Amino acid sequence: MASLLILLLATGVLASGCGSGGDSAGEGVTGEEQYKIGAVLDISGKASSLGTPERDTLQMMVKQLNTQGGINGHQVDLTILDNKSDETEAVLAAKTLIEKDVLAVLGCSSSGPSMAMLNTVQNEKVPMISLAAASSIVEPVSERQWVFKTAQSDKVTVGKITNYLREQNISKVAFLYMNNAYGDGGRIAFSEAAKENNIEILVEDKFEASDKDMTPQLTRVKASQAEALIIWAIPPSASIATKNFKDLGLTIPLIHSHGVGNQKFIDLAQGAAEGVILPIGKLTVAQQLPDTDPQKEVLLTYINNYTQKYGSPPDSFGGYAWDAFNLLVNAIEKAGPDRAAIRDELEKTQGFTGISGVFNISAQDHNGLDEESMVLVQIEDDKWQLLE
Amino acid sequence: MDTPSQLLQLLFTGLTLGSIYALIGLALVTTFNITGILNLAQGEFVTIGALLAISLYATGLPLAAAFIIAVLLVATLGGVLERCAIQTARQASALTLIIITLGLSIFLRGLALLVWGTETYSLPAFSEGGPLFIGGAAITPQSFWIFGLTALTLAGLYAFFELTYWGKAVKAAVLNRTAARLMGINPNRLSLLAFLASGALGAAAGIFIAPVTMTTYDMGFMLGVKGFVAAVIGGLNNIGGAVLGGILLGILESFSAGLISSGLKDAFAIIILIGVLLVRPQGIIGSLKERKI
């Protein structure tokens, strides 16, 4: 029964996905030329828990925008392609979109496929806004003129973590990471920050995204003198590692990265996520923020809109898509349908209050977020609880 | 934690992993023994069994009922596939038949993707309570369930092949189809039985490991590869060998990840496979002669 239901739902989702392009085309009978935008997301495959809420957010927003009259009277035609969490598919999808003459490309959801698209957009001179974490997507800026990103960089996340470690007087840690671009980005950023803050990394080990058991790596952590463990991964392997951690009877603080910022992580860990600490965008704890927080209103509006449409609250990944879409729309509003002008406008974005933080993008920083954009949370009773 | 308990921990982890591989290896060897076909869709039986049980359990059925229904459904699926795809091509060469099972595996993975999507699912552990600590090393109750299923399956298959009339008939049909037919044994019915059994066994394995490994539509491929390596290490026509091969593989993986480097873990499986094929192509306890008697 349940599987039948899922099958029906799946066909529904597919149908709505196919329909979105046609919908906006139908509405565009104002005589004005349509603005084409493309998105490449990890809708299926290993990073699907990231790509799905991003797709849903984009579909919701383009509909809202078009009913409100589009950009300067131009309807927006958004094409979303699935890269199946695969680097090659991502590049092919980006090329398909560029051939369709899109003004800009949003995506990908995760770091590996985002990195893979860099060359294509650089050569074709198409603005791209990635939704992934690795700092290397936008650094060095001199080689990434056309690339921006909305997810907080690993450096920002690492800063939050090292601050916490310093406050707790923890100087010896273990570090486990996922063997891909996301995990590697975290490892590089953390080992640099650890050196600066006199934090000693006693154990450093990796695991594959498809691994079913991280006990061997965790056994090394247990045998060491580490006072805290930092894991840099996304679900499901992040959940498995957390479960193994509890099963081994380890009691040191467990700190995760913002890659686990969705309910799926907590659900899959089956109670083992209790007490896990992580830095994350403010979305998940929007209700608990003080009223003085500049982002609170934006966050609550997004949560309301999304929950009304899809029946469950959004997560930070959907937020990255929200930011990317709005940054782009603002830039097109000012620049018009010209790729180079859009790029220049994106680079001038100052004080834009989004879901992931307040963006101050410049020629030196194509992410534009600082540590203010994140908060530390702890998981209590399967919910995110604001720490601090 | 001192070194002995660290080693013990790696051993426990290896045993759990190894039992999972052994279960899949056992199903492969059973089908191979009866039909002469290497069923490359075995890993998909594991995935679909687990996913079905998870969906059934989510509808509110008790875990035991979900388990039984899922096992029966996957056994039926195995039977249907055998009748539709294998039986119709029965006269083709062994290689063709293996390629057909490869096609079945891709078909089943696509089906699972359509029905369940790319989400990760998990089942609660069969028994309550945290891990047990033996000599400072932790072992989860679910691991014991997996050991138990492996031991039970091994004993059951051994008893069937060695002690029952039907088991001997099966072996006879493998050695010489024509002679067996003359003696009143129907190899076509045996082939159906083999796929029913491997479907059921695969599903049971999938459900037992779901609380430990979590389940996605595409996990069958890697499990199938590991099960295949386990079966080849042990010797393709030896059920005891499949278990030994699986456990050996699991322990080697665990120790190489824990003591040397986790990057080497999957390479080890292939290195061992090549090593065994070069030195003892019949497997560590299998014998090629057996099939020719």
Image (cartoon, rainbow, N blue to C red):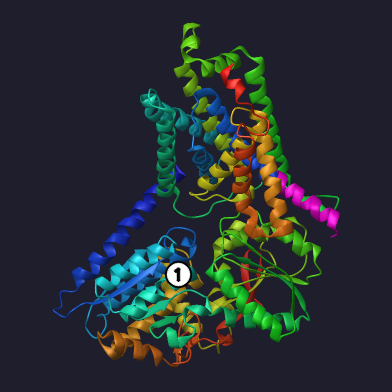
> For the N terminus of chain A, which image quadrant?
top left
Residue, x 70% and y 32% (percent of image)? B151
Which chain does tag 1 point to? A
Question: Of residues A117 and B268, which is closer to you in this image?
Answer: B268
Above or below residue A206? Residue B110 is above
Residue position for label 1: A109
The reply to whether residue B221 is visible in this rendering is yes
Q: Residue at x 64, y 45 (%)?
A: B272
Which quadrant holds residue B103? top left
Q: Is residue A361 above or below residue B23?
A: below
Residue A189, x across and y down, in percent: 61, 79
Please report the bounds of the magenta region as a residue range.
B1-15
Residue A247 spot, x, y in % from top left = 73, 55
Say if the magenta span includes residue B13.
yes
Q: Does A26 sit left or right of B97 as displayed?
A: left
Which residue sits at x=64%, y=25%?
A: B157
Instruction: Tell me the crowding category of disc 1: few under 14, some 14 to 19, or many 20 or more residues within 10 angstroms, Cα based.
Output: many
- Prevailing secondary structure class for the magenta stretch in the rendered image: helix
Using the rendered image of the protein, determine whether residue B63 is visible from the camera's viewpoint.
Answer: no
Q: Is residue A137 left or right of residue B136?
A: left
Relative vertical location of residue A204 with respect to residue A166 in this rendering, above or below: above
Of residues A383 and A168, the one nearer the viewer is A168
Name which residue type carries label 1. Ser
Q: Residue furthest front?
A: B279
Instruction: Please tell me whether residue B213 belongs to the stretch shown in magenta.
Output: no
Please identify the quarter of the rendering in which residue B62 is found. Answer: top right
Per the image, label 1 sits on a secondary structure element best described as loop
- Residue A318: x percent and y percent? 45, 71
Q: Is residue B84 left or right of residue B239?
A: left
Residue at the left extreme, as displayed: A31
